Image (cartoon, coloured by chain):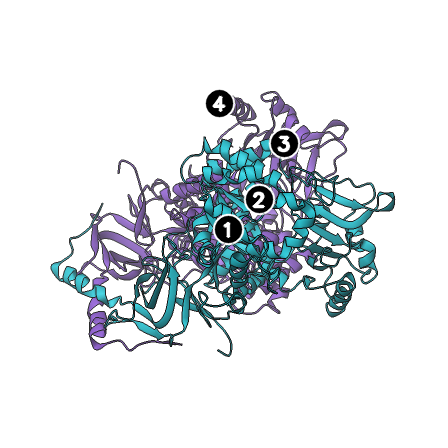
Chain colours: A cyan, B purple
Amino acid sequence: MVKPVLLTSVTLALLAVSQPALADALIDNVDGMTLDADGKVVRFTGILMTPDGKVVKLLAAKDKRPDRLDWRADMKGRVLLPGFVDAHGHVMELGFSAVLLDLSTARTLDEAKARIAAYAAANPDRKWILGGGWNQERWGLGRFPTAADLDSVVSDRPVFLSRIDGHAAWANSAAIRAAGVTAASVSPAGGRIEKGAGGTPAGVFVDAAQDLVRKAVPQPLPKDRDTAVLSAQATLLSMGVTAAADMGTSVDDWLSYRRVADRGALRVRIISYGAGIDDTVRIGGTGPSPWLYADRLRLAGVKLYGDGALGSRGAWLKAPYADAPGQSGLGFMTDTVIRNLMSRAAMDNYQVAVHAIGDRANAQVLDAIEELSATYKGDRRWRIEHAQVIDPTDLKRFAAHGTIASMQPTHQTSDRTMAEARLGAARLAGAYAWRTMLANGVPLAFGSDFPVERPDPFAGWAAAFTRQDADGQPSGGWRPEEAVTREQAWRAFTQGGAYAAFAEDKFGRLAPGQRADFIIVDRDPLLASPSDLRATKVQETWVGGEKVWERKGG
Amino acid sequence: MVKPVLLTSVTLALLAVSQPALADALIDNVDGMTLDADGKVVRFTGILMTPDGKVVKLLAAKDKRPDRLDWRADMKGRVLLPGFVDAHGHVMELGFSAVLLDLSTARTLDEAKARIAAYAAANPDRKWILGGGWNQERWGLGRFPTAADLDSVVSDRPVFLSRIDGHAAWANSAAIRAAGVTAASVSPAGGRIEKGAGGTPAGVFVDAAQDLVRKAVPQPLPKDRDTAVLSAQATLLSMGVTAAADMGTSVDDWLSYRRVADRGALRVRIISYGAGIDDTVRIGGTGPSPWLYADRLRLAGVKLYGDGALGSRGAWLKAPYADAPGQSGLGFMTDTVIRNLMSRAAMDNYQVAVHAIGDRANAQVLDAIEELSATYKGDRRWRIEHAQVIDPTDLKRFAAHGTIASMQPTHQTSDRTMAEARLGAARLAGAYAWRTMLANGVPLAFGSDFPVERPDPFAGWAAAFTRQDADGQPSGGWRPEEAVTREQAWRAFTQGGAYAAFAEDKFGRLAPGQRADFIIVDRDPLLASPSDLRATKVQETWVGGEKVWERKGG
């Protein structure tokens, strides 16, 4: 019924002439640098952008600037880099961590207890004291902390605190009572209740056992979630992170991201991996979502957990822990279950990201990928998150099916002493093996695992090519043969994360057609010493050609 | 830092000249009619629209058509009306009803049993036989049907069937067993387990008691929800409904609407009222969502239930049922609870829509509105859904705080015999009192309560000014003093629904600035006899200036 009427010649002429009215914008006078698609450094002095914030062209000093522009920003010679892509973080948890009790810098149990007491006094209205960051290894405690330790400072209301790696939690007696856990309670599959005299819960709950207490914790309200998203976003942008993979998005997390985006307030790009298959399918239905809000949000796939973490001895090892001969960690899924879940996801084209820290867990995921790749062909980009401890015989298996190693350089520097104790010298050969991954042709994506580590990508970048921590320890780097180059590390923190999320055509570098996501920093990161690189200050953060964050006071 | 550069005079000239390139479109040669904002009929022969589908101007035959147009559609003199707005429906349930067992046209228990047997045979893979539409009143059964009635046709798997009004459900023994309901089970607050000999569950579960069995029914998968949304949308558009209030959107419903919309497939406009306060807040956070997808989706507020329905004697009456002297129905909330819930919603600017059928329930909601209006000022548009049986002394209270009466004309024609039996003659004075509502200055919004009734607005329109059913019964109309005029009914089915959803500036009539939502029909509804009006066929449905449905074969 609808018959398009031919455009008159007058209209056609107008259309042809009117195109230049949509003029471009210019970011000019920058000391710009990016990697190209081959990982080579490209330097430039200007970025020409479309009105909707995509790169038209990088301009060299000698290139003539267009006569007609919508607007132009003079960056006064400052250093400009592509925004960082954090390949593995937890957006909502980062936001909540800002209002929770933070024990990550406590150096002793007594210091932790003092902070817990101070926080409880400062927050009389909080019905539960929640937080985390404790690390009994750092405290040199030689044991897990106990409920009694907590009761001595807070006994009037529940206290529930996550370990630094999220793989264990510490509860006081009020929390254990509120959760109804008793001496008769048994450890669930994939978890362990630490027991004291007479089988009474000692106070620490490992991996799946945490849920026994966590289910009693009041859920955050939707408005608290929105506040947390905005807080996390501000933190990420202030550190130069313009896109992040959210590793375990719940339905309520997703609803919150959408609320923030619907109100036009989502600035950072979030690539969601649903928290398990049920939430993923509830969010995505028959497959990943489209890219939403001008590429600022997408449900890409599912996050699964293959095992726990090294610190809590939850990482699943092929041989027992060197410092706990009776334990080999916890596999969260049987071979059948992991195949079924991965298959269920792949069937609907969800990307699959599996947390695997121990060599046994990594082998299990690699086995599953090998088997599923026969059925689910094409560009699947199976992801192994952390890929921390690998049996050297398994290292080469990553490349076979294009499996992505999604790794966190700062975990290596935080964990090295603990990892040596847990694994013993012989098993370190395949641990944190970044360079070997690249040498084997494995796509490498770097992230921080925020809020487990700070999301600061400059700290991760420096760690990646030095294998040293912020104090320059150990001298010469820890197993420096697994360091990558400065450029390789930069690439894994930008293009690597984008590729790992099927976003390499959208962001991760500065080139024609890419979103203009960039940051202005106070130094040249390719020339800075490692300690200078760590001290880099982000001055401005731009996403999609729009300035979305600026350091107060310049 | 960003300094917009002044536009050059050349660019300015181009911008000025290029505006006409965004030319309008013309729907021409129509026999067009709409109501204006005052409810007066306006006739026109063309609609000039913007490229994004808003009405620029209605054109009379004598008005000159623009020279420059993007496109023009010649409607060949056919009748064009604004799309209908259904003020009260259940989108997801409408979609599911298409694949469920439908007993709404069964005239006897035996006929129902035959259909159940046939459906079970035709659907051997369905683990539960689900559906509804039964009405023991229509069957002249003089009692509720029983589990034994069902067992005689299906005993190998659970059967669970909703009553026509959704306020009761009928289960077979397998379903009762699967749900773990026994003679020892007690009726929950706000519900009733019909009991047989020795207290055994008889097979019917009224109002809140339905959940005892429903919780055992497997949940539909997300993909089934998406299919249901598309099915419901096709049904609505085929009947000329271009916008509908969804009265009880769950989190999973919302996720499905968004998936469909994200993929660009949402055509009908859905105004969501969340299913209870928890789901509303989980979806909306600190308030209603913005209008999304070019005004095709919005979370507007919350749906609450004040009581049940007349058919199942769940409607909450001030005095006992005429045909069941021991019963007065069920109030779902105490006065305190309803105030708390309404207050909780209003605090965050959620609109509140409360289901109230019986006079006691209506009085309770009116009391709550009166009290809350002192705190929550401004344009709140409290909604009472159904407002079916009102104590005449309460009728005038609607207008005091701008309360909207959201009513369903076809309920009156379907229910009249049953209503007479339930209420007795004396209580009919304030029942289905549409004209009195208008006379009192109460904003009236009409809907169908689909899928309880068919969403066909022409059936509702005809019922509204005749008080007769599709067979013309009763002669002269049932309590014809409460009929409204043809134009008043039309207005309540268009502008009324838009106003009730704070959408009167967006759709509901054809006028400059409104979305171009219209339908092409095969007759003039202002001239047709009531039976001819009921037979109206929609030929095309347009939403936002885009044709989204067309009758196959013209």
Residue A448 located left or right of residue B233: right
Tag 1 or tag 2, which sits nearer the N-term?
1
Does residue B429 appear in this view?
no
Report the mark closest to the observer, 2 or 3.
Answer: 2
Q: Mark 3: which amino acid?
A: Phe
The verdict on a common chain for dots 1 and 4 is no
Q: Position of residue B145 (x, y in %)?
A: 62, 29
- For disc 2, the marked residue is A430
Residue B374 figure quarter? bottom right
Tag 3 or tag 4, which sits nearer the N-term?
4
Tag 3 subunit? B
- Residue at figure coordinates x 32%, y 65% from the top left: A51
Q: CA distance from mark 2 to mark 4?
A: 58 Å
Q: CA distance from mark 2 to mark 3?
A: 71 Å
Tag 1 subunit? A
Report the mark closest to the observer, 2 or 4.
Answer: 2
* Vertical position of residue B190 compared to residue A226: above or below: above
Which quarter of the image is occupied by the N terminus of chain B? Answer: bottom left
The verdict on a common chain for dots 2 and 3 is no
Q: Position of residue A407 (x, y in %)?
A: 54, 50
- For disc 3, the marked residue is B144
Q: Mark 2: which amino acid?
A: Gly
Q: Mark 1: which amino acid?
A: Ser
Q: Mark 4: which amino acid?
A: Ala
- Residue at figure coordinates x 50%, y 22% from the top left: B118
- For disc 1, the marked residue is A272
Q: Position of residue B239 (x, y in %)?
A: 37, 43
Q: CA distance from mark 1 to mark 3?
A: 50 Å
Q: CA distance from mark 4 to mark 3?
A: 26 Å
